[in-house]
Image: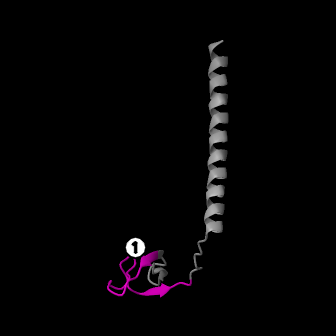
Amino acid sequence: MPIFEFRCQQCDEQFESLVLHSSAPARCPACDSNHLEKLISLPVVSSDHTRKRARQSARAHASGIRHEKQHEDHKELHGHLAEDH
């Protein structure tokens, strides 16, 4: 996909825009200026290995959030039990 990053020279807003040959020139979404600087972007590379690593990272992150929530629920439950006595 031809997605490019731009910086508006008028208001300094940075944004991404899909640029097709048939589309109108990109404009700043903040101030509607067409005085834009195209920024150099890092290429995105996707392979089976990078997708696998991304899934593993997402699972580890979700597991950490689940563990933290369980811990907070446990503390809250014991807090309420202590208040009842």
Highlighted magenta segment, given as a residue range: 16-40
- Seen in the picture, residue 51 relative to 15 is either above or below; the reply is above
Is 23 inside the magenta-drawn segment? yes
- Secondary structure predominantly adopted by residues drawn in magenta: loop
In the image, residue 69 above or below residue 61:
above
Residue 1 x %, y %: 45, 78
Q: In the depicted view, which residue is nearer to us: 62 or 53?
A: 53
Residue 53: image x %, image y %?
A: 66, 62
Q: Which residue is drawn at 46% across and 75% down?
A: 16
31 vs 60, left or right, is left
What residue would you read off at disc 1?
Answer: 30
Q: Is residue 63 left or right of residue 40?
A: right
The residue positioned farthest toward the top in the image shown: 85
Q: Kindly identify the residue that appears in the image at 61 percent across and 64 percent down.
A: 51
Q: In this view, does 13 lie above or below 67?
A: below
Q: What residue type is labelled 1?
A: Ala
Can you give x and y, in whole percent of width and height, for residue 29 in the image?
39, 74
Residue at image coords 58%, 79%: 43
Q: Nearer the viewer, residue 68 or 33?
A: 68
Dot 1: few (<14), some (14–19), or many (≥20) neighbours within 10 Å? few
Image quarter where the C terminus lies is top right
User: In this image, 18 relative to 57: left or right?
Assistant: left
Q: Does the magenta stretch include residue 68?
A: no
**Secondary structure found at label 1:** loop
Q: Which of 39 and 20 is in front in this view?
A: 20
Q: Nearer the viewer, residue 1 or 34?
A: 1
Q: Position of residue 17 (x, y in %)?
A: 43, 77
